[in-house]
Image: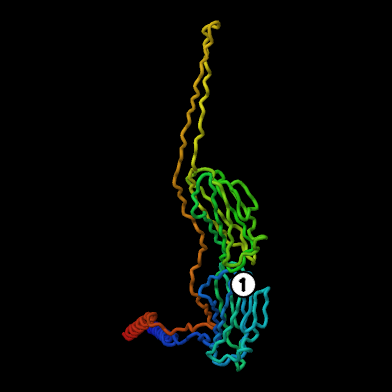
Amino acid sequence: MLRSRILGLLLAITTALFLLVVGVLFFGGSVRPAAAQSNGLRVEKTLLKSSNVVMVGETLTFAITITNNWHTTVITLPVVDTYDRSVLAYINATPAEDSHSPSTGVINWDNILATTGPLAPGEQVVILVRFTAEHPSPRVVNHAATHDAYDSLGNLVGDGEAEHDNEAVGGQTPLEKTLDAGVLPQAGQRITFTIRVQNAGLVDVVSLPLEDTFDPTALQFIASEPMPDTLEPGKLTWANLLTPPRPVRLPPNEFISITTVFTALKGIEQTTNSARVVGAGDSFGNNLAPAADDVPIRIIAGPATATPTRTPRPTPAATAINQATATSVVSATEVVITTPTIVISSTATIEAIATLTPEQGNGSTATPTVIPAVLPDTSTGPNSQNTWWLGAAILAILLLGIGLTQRSRG
């Protein structure tokens, strides 16, 4: 009797497990999370430039594109655009904004559709926003977003947002120093160098210090145009080349030239004359990247003439034979030995002149950053590859039930 009850209990448990597995297999896969709303607004923000790298002083134009993915017409569409005010300066926008806060870097449109009209399903509205890059920065983020958008039925439309990353780089003043062509550096002769500094940026340069260094044992400074503010052994310094009576600003792509004149003191295998710009600044108060250039030269010895050397006159040696009879006078012969003139000549070799060229950024195509206004539908149905164990469990339970039933009958 007890045995029959135990077998009946096991059969009931087996049946319950079987029904549980069947329920999970056939009904569990149909329990899906609520699908993410596919409607709403999509915002794209793109920089209208072929490269994400911009130079200080460059004007940047961003396009904010808003697409209506809602099933009804949107009639109210507020937009806010934020920017890094430590790097960018706002110029204007089309359509014009309703408010702008330079202290916080926030631009607001209360309803962008007030000027463009209602936004039907599938339609787009584009806002153009312009800035000036005033300071260098490795990462500049410009962010745009919609909020509190309503359709014609009074429903709140899903918000959208997007941002754009780019890099702002400072200006440069590449420097080139050259030795006058056709001049053979020779001891005792004058040597002329030309220093040329160019503004390779997009903003006026207002401060341009310059240093020129040389070997004082090989070169002697004679003059320059303009003259340096400080003259030290082996070093010439101009505190700022952009001072009256010279121009006080160096516009983009223009250059300034400085001429320096030295005397070669001696023959030397190689000496280097260097120039560099350190601490230059633009009209936005940015420090520009240093620039330098070297001119290695070889100075040959000049013609040398030996000075004739006169031998000393010998002292006559008189011998008294007899005072009474006679006095002998011995005269010396003057001998002059002259050393020949020696002319030393050689061929000078001028080394290659290094020219500093500003590094150019690699252009890359800016890819619009799209952040969907809503979440994607991530629901999935049952995976046949992952449910094989359920079938095996059902088969095992059935076999267990059959075995128990046969045993109870026996």
The three-letter code of the residue at mark 1 reads: Leu
Residue picked out by circle 1 = 88
State which quarter of the image contains the N terminus. Answer: bottom left
Q: Can residue 2 be seen in this view?
A: no
Q: Residue at x 61, y 58 (%)?
A: 279
Q: Residue 212, how many percent across, how many down?
A: 58, 52
Query: For the view shown, which residue lies furthest in the front direction?
Result: 325
User: Of helix, strand and loop, which one carries label 1?
Assistant: strand
**16 left or right of 180?**
left
**Nearer to us in this view, 347 or 203:** 347
Query: For the view shown, which residue lies furthest in the bottom direction?
Result: 153
57 to 341, vertically: above or below? below
**260 left or right of 364?**
right
Q: Residue 132, how many percent across, how many down?
A: 61, 73
Q: Is residue 350 visible?
A: yes
Crowdedness near tag 1: few (<14), some (14–19) or many (≥20) residues, C-alpha within 10 Å: many
Q: Which residue is drawn at 53% across and 58% down?
A: 176
